[in-house]
């Protein structure tokens, strides 16, 4: 059997996974003893750095 079609889901087209992704980030940070709100993790400007939108997480970053 050959492949007849392939479906690519750009987030929000078929499944809106943004909320799940944000919660996964919050859960992962909690395992390191850090906290972050959904608002802190939301990043509309892709040029932002963790230092700008989550300054309290910077010490957790590898050197």
Image (tube, rainbow, N blue to C red):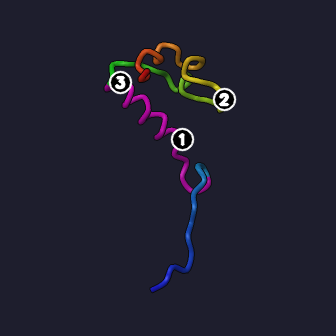
Residue 17 location (% of width, % of height)? 51, 45
Task: Identify residue for label 1.
Answer: 18
Disc 2 crowd, CA 10 A, few/some/many (<14, 14-19, 20+):
few
Q: Are marks 2 and 3 in contact (CB under 8 Å)?
A: no
Disc 3 crowd, CA 10 A, few/some/many (<14, 14-19, 20+):
few
Figure quadrant of residue 13 = bottom right
Q: Earlier in the sequence, mark 3 or mark 1?
A: 1
Q: Nearer the viewer, residue 55 or 24?
A: 55
Q: Secondary structure at mark 2?
A: loop
Total number of numbered discs in the rendering: 3
Q: CA distance from mark 2 to mark 3?
A: 25 Å
Q: Earlier in the sequence, mark 2 or mark 1?
A: 1
* Residue 26 lies in the magenta-colored region: yes
Tell me the chief SS of the magenta region.
helix
Q: Are marks 2 and 1 in contact (CB under 8 Å)?
A: no
Residue at the image point whose x is 40% and y is 19% from the top = 60
Figure quadrant of residue 51 = top right
Task: Identify residue for label 3.
Answer: 30
Residue at the farthest bottom position: 1
Task: Identify residue for label 2.
Answer: 47
* Residue 46 lies in the magenta-colored region: no
Q: Earlier in the sequence, mark 2 or mark 3?
A: 3
For the magenta stretch, what is the residue range? Answer: 13-31
Q: CA distance from mark 3 to mark 1?
A: 18 Å
């Amino acid at each position: 059997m050959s492949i007849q079609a392939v479906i690519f889901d750009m987030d929000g087209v078929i499944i809106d996974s943004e909320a799940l992704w944000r919660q996964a980030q919050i859960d992962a940070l909690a395992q390191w003893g850090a906290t972050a709100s959904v608002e802190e993790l939301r990043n509309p400007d892709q040029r932002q750095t963790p230092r700008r939108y989550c300054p309290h997480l910077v010490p957790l970053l590898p050197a």
